[in-house]
């Protein structure tokens, strides 16, 4: 079962994973109210659909217009863009030609991005071990990175009997070229994400991009989570999201 970006961020945040402030919205009014609460001066209006590639995607009613993730600088622009996106169909590399109708938005505070990295955790069925993957090529389609420049993806396999240890996270942080306080921030981030992954019986958690901000913080700018349907009975709070997820 797949959930929306904002739902994944809310779940991850309860485990201590750093995420920007944001507000979910099902209407233009909610988008404006959320934007006012966040305060600005920069907001990002993000389409919530069950597919990636939203930023580079295009709306079927405005194929030469802006994509499904828009950075804006006023509440009027939040309103205008929310009105254009809600109810429209977003076509991305992952939706197929039919696209997906945008029924909800996430209004997020604008982030000062210094670097975009990639961090993924997934269950390797064959070995039933968790694999952590990182890459300096964040914000890009990771399948393409894997195909064309596989040397830019580093993988660490976690023994379930031991779990993810700080040294695993430090090794991954150094391989991303993080330094100073960024290293500890990344270690804390990865261990919190690992805890969320295992306790929630996720099958994949993908943060693309994982961002280093101008002030050296580490935050999840995007989040994708999938769950093993057979374990959902253990997680009422996630199973509840299913209706929304399969709208
Ligand atoms: P998708 O992967 O579906 O295109 P993302 O959430 O990764 O959607 O957003 C696409 C891009 O938009 C990101 O790589 C980032 O550059 C930018 N972006 C997303 N959220 C924010 C934000 N809160 N502040 C600034 N830029 C953002
Ligand atoms: Mg993304």
Image (cartoon, rainbow, N blue to C red):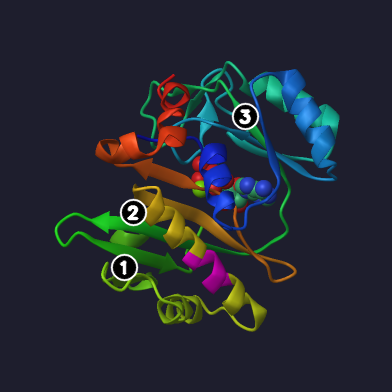
Q: CA distance from mark 2 to mark 1?
A: 9 Å
Give the numbered dot on residue 105.
3
Q: Which residues are magenta?
A: 186-191
Above or below: residue 173 compared with residue 77: below
Above or below: residue 166 compared with residue 89: below
> Between residues 207 and 159, which one lies in front from this camera angle?
159
Cβ of mark 1 under 8 A from ligand 2: no
Give the numbered dot on residue 150.
1
Q: Quadrant of residue 1?
A: top left
Q: Is residue 65 left or right of residue 95?
A: right
Mark 2 — residue? Answer: 143
Q: CA distance from mark 3 to mark 1?
A: 34 Å
Provide the secondary structure element on which disc 2 rests: helix
**Location of residue 72 in the rendering, given as x and y in whole percent from the top left corner:** 76, 39
Provide the secondary structure element on which disc 1 rests: helix
> Between residues 222 and 189, which one lies in front from this camera angle?
189
* Chief SS of the magenta region: helix
**Location of residue 51 in the rendering, given as x and y in whole percent from the top left corner:** 43, 35
- Would you say residue 56 is visible in this rendering? no
Quick one: label 2, few (<14), some, or many (20+) residues within 10 Å? few
Residues marked 2 and 1 touching at CB (< 8 Å): no
Q: Quadrant of residue 245?
A: top left
Q: Residue at x 71, y 54 (%)?
A: 111
Cβ of mark 2 under 8 A from ligand 1: no
Q: Quadrant of residue 24?
A: top right
Nearer-N-terminus badge (2/1) = 2
Quick one: label 3, few (<14), some, or many (20+) residues within 10 Å? many
How many numbered circles does the render carry? 3
> Between residues 80 and 10, which one lies in front from this camera angle?
10
**Location of residue 96 in the rendering, given as x and y in whole percent from the top left corner:** 36, 28
């Amino acid at each position: 079962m797949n959930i929306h970006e904002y739902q994944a961020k809310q779940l991850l945040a309860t485990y201590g994973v750093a995420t920007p402030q944001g507000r979910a919205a099902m209407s233009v009014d909610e988008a404006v109210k959320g934007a006012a609460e966040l305060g600005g001066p920069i907001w990002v209006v993000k389409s919530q659909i069950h597919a990636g590639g939203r930023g580079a995607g295009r709306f079927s009613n405005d194929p030469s217009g802006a994509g499904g993730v828009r950075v804006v600088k006023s509440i009027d622009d939040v309103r205008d863009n929310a009105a254009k996106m809600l109810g429209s169909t977003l076509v991305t590399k992952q939706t197929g030609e039919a696209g997906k109708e945008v029924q909800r938005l996430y209004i997020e505070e604008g982030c000062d991005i210094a670097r975009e990295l990639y961090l993924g955790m997934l269950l390797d069925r064959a070995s039933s071990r968790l694999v952590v993957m990182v890459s300096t090529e964040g914000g890009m389609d990771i399948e393409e990175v894997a195909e064309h420049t596989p040397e830019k993806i580093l993988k660490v396999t976690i023994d379930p009997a031991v779990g993810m240890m700080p040294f695993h996270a430090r090794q991954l942080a150094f391989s991303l070229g993080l330094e100073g306080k960024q290293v500890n921030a990344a270690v804390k981030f990865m261990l919190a994400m690992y805890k969320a992954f295992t306790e929630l019986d996720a099958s994949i958690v993908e943060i693309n991009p994982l961002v280093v901000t101008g002030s050296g913080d580490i935050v999840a700018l995007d989040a994708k989570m999938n769950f093993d349907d057979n374990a959902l009975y253990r997680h009422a709070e996630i199973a509840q999201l299913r209706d929304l997820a399969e709208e």
